[in-house]
């Protein structure tokens, strides 16, 4: 416990909140990049499909938004916005750190996986344009796990008593 006391509760809580935002953002950047690479190939051949390609590319970006929501909510609950966070114990800081981990890791991995599914859906759009909504359904299946990560982090943050 002495190791954690060297950092303090506030630093540990902020580290968890920061990881939720940063790792989810990294996953979203990677996922939207994967989908964007597939999309540019299709748009070279058929620029009229830009709207559908853009929708498929944007979908993996939601995890970054979810991570930012968890970051903001954790920072708010820690009392950083009203100045009461500075007396946070190490135990409270560790609670926030652990509560933010589902969104941090879930956001990172689900966004990358969703980017791969979106890239495959863009290939579907290229070959069978009338079936592109099936690709959307496949992307939304991965989104479900990002939402579960968001829910897990939010419920844990709500139940931390300070």
Image: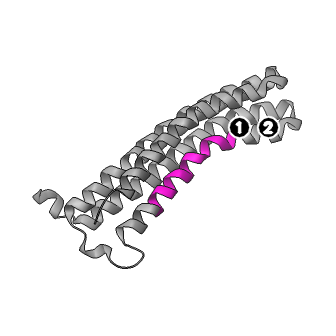
* Image location of residue 5, percent across then percent down: 16, 63
Decide if residue 161 is on the left or right side of residue 113. Answer: left
Decide if residue 161 is on the left or right side of residue 80. Answer: left
Q: To which residue does mark 2 refer?
A: 52
Q: Is residue 89 magenta?
A: no
Q: Is residue 61 magenta?
A: yes
Q: Residue furthest bottom?
A: 83
Q: Secondary structure at mark 1?
A: helix
Q: Residue furthest left?
A: 2
Decide if residue 115 is on the left or right side of residue 56. Answer: left
Decide if residue 57 is on the left or right side of residue 71. Answer: right
* Image location of residue 20, percent across then percent down: 43, 52
Q: Secondary structure at mark 2?
A: helix
> Which image quadrant for residue 47?
top right
- Give the main secondary structure of the magenta stretch: helix
Q: To which residue does mark 1 refer?
A: 56
* Image location of residue 87, percent across then percent down: 24, 74
Q: What is the spatial separation of the Cα atoms under label 2 and label 1, in whole angstroms? A: 6 Å
- Asked if the residue under mark 1 is in contact with the one under mark 2, i.e. CB atoms within 8 Å, the reply is yes
> Which image quadrant for residue 134?
top right
- Please report the bounds of the magenta region as a residue range: 57-72
Going 73% across and 29% down the picture, which residue do you hit? 122
Q: Residue furthest top?
A: 127
Going 82% across and 34% down the picture, which residue do you hit? 44
């Amino acid at each position: 416990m002495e190791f954690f006391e060297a950092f303090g509760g506030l630093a540990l809580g902020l580290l968890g909140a920061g990881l939720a935002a940063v790792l989810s953002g990294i996953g979203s950047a990677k996922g939207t990049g994967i989908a964007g690479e597939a999309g540019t190939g299709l748009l070279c051949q058929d620029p009229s499909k830009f709207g559908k390609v853009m929708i498929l590319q944007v979908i993996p970006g939601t995890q970054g938004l979810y991570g930012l929501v968890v970051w903001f909510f954790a920072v708010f609950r820690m009392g950083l916005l009203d100045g009461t966070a500075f007396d946070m114990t190490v135990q409270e800081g560790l609670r926030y750190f652990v509560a933010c981990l589902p969104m941090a890791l879930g956001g990172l991995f689900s966004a990358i996986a969703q980017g791969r599914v979106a890239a495959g859906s863009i290939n579907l759009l290229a070959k069978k344009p009338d079936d592109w909504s099936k690709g959307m359904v496949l992307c939304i299946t991965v989104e479900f796990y990002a939402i579960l990560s968001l829910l897990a982090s939010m419920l844990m943050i709500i139940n931390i008593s300070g």
